[in-house]
Image: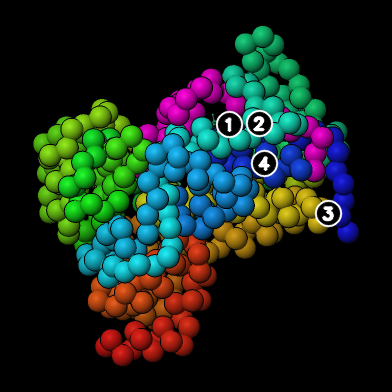
Amino acid sequence: MRHTRSGRAVVIGGSVAGLLAARALHETFDEVVVLDRDALPGAPEVRKGVPQGGHVHGLLARGRAALDELFEGLSQELIDRGAPVFDVQDDMEWWVDGRPLARAASGMFALAPSRSLLEFAIRRRVESLPNVRVLAGHTVTGLLITSDGSRCNGVRFTDDMTPGSVEEADLVVDATGRAARGRIWLEGLGFPPAREQRIETQVTYVTRRYRREPHHLGGMAGLSIGAYPGSSRSAFTLAQEDDSWVVTITGRFGAVPPTDDAGMLDWVSDLASPGIAEIIRDAEPLSEPVKMRYPASTRIRYDEMERFPSGLLIVGDALCSFNPVYGQGMTVAALEALLLGRLLKEGTDDLSAEFFFAAQALIDVPWSTVAATDLQFAETVGDRSGLDPERGAYLAHLRRVAAQDAVLASAFLRVAQLVDPPAALFAPEIVQRVEVAG
Ligand SMILES: Cc1cc2nc3c(=O)[nH]c(=O)nc-3n(C[C@H](O)[C@H](O)[C@H](O)COP(=O)(O)OP(=O)(O)OC[C@H]3O[C@@H](n4cnc5c(N)ncnc54)[C@H](O)[C@@H]3O)c2cc1C
């Protein structure tokens, strides 16, 4: 049965997950208010509340498709603004476990806007929805909960004009990112702490933008050199708007990449492919290097809580934050928004429980990729009890032979891009191909 909802929804956080949630909510609520503590820039710019915005942000093929479902024509709009679009397998080089994946036309297209351009374009779309208001400079300081603790019915916030104000709501969505404010507020209100799953890799990113020239990387749109046990440095570059490259170099387990030219070059000098070293050495820098530490992937199990207030949802990085080297966060935020929109349209008596249950099923897939890959490193701290060594050995073999076999490389990338489920790598024809390859 379709429920028609009315009333007001308040979203805390106007970054990618909050804006996409607002897009989902606007169809069923009379009014949607997005509150962000930052001054939101009138142009694509990195801002204080999203410090990761200056670093490479790959948008997976599944994420691009999901964004187009949420905002018709968004890909084209980004292309018109200069974001490169390219075949994920043919126009980009992927080094996995120290070997390149075989290249071929895959029909899987990715888009590479900068993180700032993508958020800006999404915000403009959301601001144009007639019943949505995006309010900058509004810092939410807590949740309003009914006296019996059963329902969340608004938020407290401060802004320049009115410290200590209240915004009442029929639904509150926490999209405050990794800081996961909602979790802290709930604990402060006496709710038991939700279980947190952690996979600690202590990754540090150093990123700089360079001028892109046609001869760089032999005309390709990107290069990814992944870490693997025995080689824990990685590097990634993508072509972006304004004829630029965004280059990110990373270290794990507390190893911090340098930010000076010679040090950056040295950091990548013994990586499997020379492409990133060539850009750092030859291309004109367009920005100063920026650094960011990312201690651990975190997944908060609100779905397991016995007591949780109705009228409250938690989305995006606040619900699950994935090691960014796999580029999954924005895609998962888009898939959560599609899920939320579907649940609201179908109608449900217990939106929070249904959302958390279905969102965890959605998160299972990208989380299992992070777990299987990161827990291969002896230094990673995390729960290894769910790992299946036989499955791990098969997948390592598949990745090895995918260096020569473009069909297997495509199958691997389709799963990594969240286009196909992991089970696709166990389809009989794929298993046979892996076996035949020896
Ligand atoms: C280094 C790095 C690289 C990444 N690379 C990729 C990538 O390649 N591909 C990818 O898909 N994802 C990547 N991610 C993840 C991606 O950045 C996030 O998934 C995405 O931004 C969605 O996050 P979010 O909207 O949940 O939270 P955030 O983007 O962190 O935004 C949180 C928002 O909440 C606001 N806020 C916080 N507290 C309050 C408050 N009390 N009151 C009001 N507002 C508040 C902040 O101002 C901010 O706007 C990366 C992350 C990191 C750290």
| Residue 326 in the image, given as x and y percentages of width and height | 40, 55
Q: CA distance from mark 1 to mark 3?
A: 28 Å
Viewer-nearest of discs 1 and 3: 1
| Magenta part, dominant SS | loop
The C terminus, quarter of image: bottom left
* Residue name at image x 36 percent, y 77 percent: 407
* Observer-nearest of 219 and 270: 219
Mark 1, other Cα within 10 Å: few <14 / some 14–19 / many ≥20: few
* Residue name at image x 21 percent, y 58 percent: 231
Mark 4, other Cα within 10 Å: few <14 / some 14–19 / many ≥20: many
Which badge, 3 or 2, is on the more N-terminal residue?
A: 2
Residue 269 visible, this orientation: yes
Q: CA distance from mark 2 to mark 1?
A: 6 Å
Q: Which residue is mark 2?
A: 128
Q: Is residue 43 left or right of residue 341?
A: left
Q: Amino acid at mark 1?
A: Arg
Viewer-nearest of discs 3 and 2: 2
Q: Amino acid at mark 4?
A: Arg
Which badge, 3 or 4, is on the more N-terminal residue?
A: 4
Q: Which residue is mark 1?
A: 124
Q: Is residue 410 above or below residue 38?
A: below
Q: Which residue is mark 4?
A: 23
